[in-house]
Image (cartoon, grey):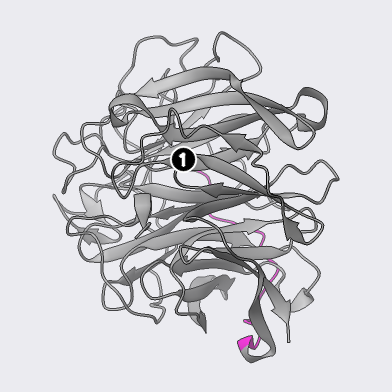
Amino acid sequence: MKRLLLFLTLPMLACGGSGLAAPTITPLSPTGAVSAPQTESQSETPTSPPTLAPTINASQFPDPNNFAWVPVVDGLNRPVDLQSAFDGSGRLFIIEKYGVIRIFKDGQLMPQPFLNIEDRVDDGSNEMGLLGLAFHPDYEQNGYFYVNYTGDGGNTRISRFQAVGDSADPNSEQVLMVVDQPFPNHNGGAVVFGPDGYLYLGLGDGGAAGDPFKNGQNTGALLGKILRIDVNNGVPYAVPADNPFGNEVWAYGLRNPWRMSFDRDTGDLWIGDVGQNKYEEIDYLPAGSAGGANFGWSIMEASYGYDGTSQPGMFLPAAEYSHDFGCSVTGGYVYRGSMPEWNGVYLYGDYCTGTVWGLILSNGQWQSQVMFETDLLITSFGVDEAGELYLVSDNGSAYILARK
């Protein structure tokens, strides 16, 4: 089904449900800056990544028996993302993989789509389709939002559209970026605005198995990366002057960053990176980190050697689990809603098993614990304007975390 981007179709999946304690992050200096063409400016490769000092409130896990995932909407067609425009309207926007964005408003799913681009979305393979959505920080004024989808030839397109009210104009598309995809899997999909106002994009390594073109460690390639671009300047965008390699690349060494998020309170960055055939991982960068973080793929799979062994300059995961416990990680969010027990807990899940873990920093060590066994195919998480957390399932439904 739609494990889509996350659901690696080669030796990259598994199933299960119990959290493993993650190795302590050891941030060392990234290595090997490679300049790329079409740059606006270039800064030197960072030599000393910031000290790990997350400002997470939770010091212990809440009792999950007091909470449940309550369904709020069903009847969706392979939903893969849920986002708020943070425009005061209370609307939730839900991506359906084949090329439609739906609006959930006033407790019901609106019959007319917000956007329909089925005519240009290629969803011919499981990890292809309309994959990610982010609203411009000034959406109330300009109506701009950004999507990641696979178009002609299965290549990744990052595009801007414009909307008025509950309707977006499909003819308003401005294509910002087209990235060639050598294979139909590992397309990534995350689209997120950071607290710095720049747009961050998660792109996979290009597919097949084992990163055959070694894109993950090539800082001159856009695949296997977190990209960072300035959509408020330049045509069609500008490369921020402090990007570490003079191109769009912000962080590298990623296999398939399907979902990532910034903590709305702290600005910390969380990345769910889908693994190869043994391990899934959650990566973390504290707010204020310089660019150039190397998360290790394909030298490493999580904290284990794949093409080699751990090297100076690589950031180990904040959390990981083996394929004894799942097959494909779905990155989530730090909870910042109305239930104080959950405040500061990062929640993430697994597509195959429906397991949801919580992750906190306790006594200087990352602690990951199983919170829920849902039996859902978890494609994404989302948050609303109030910071409440939602779970999106490939079974066609969305759920909210609520007190029993």
Q: Position of residue 348 (x, y in %)?
A: 51, 66
Query: Looking at the image, which residue is at 17% across and 44% down?
Result: 208
**Label 1 packing within 10 angstroms: few (<14), some (14-19), many (20+):** many
On screen, residue 372 above or below 80: below
Q: Is residue 310 magenta?
A: no
Query: Looking at the image, which residue is at 68% across and 30% down?
Result: 168
Query: Looking at the image, which residue is at 61% across and 35% down?
Result: 115
On screen, residue 289 above or below 400: above
Disc tally is 1
Report the side of 121 relative to 264 (left or right): left
For the C terminus, the image quarter is bottom right
Along the viewing direction, whichever of 394 and 32 lies nearer the viewer: 394
Query: Looking at the image, which residue is at 54% across and 41% down?
Result: 100
Magenta-drawn segment: 50-64
Q: Does residue 335 show up? A: no
Along the viewing direction, whichever of 172 and 259 lies nearer the viewer: 172
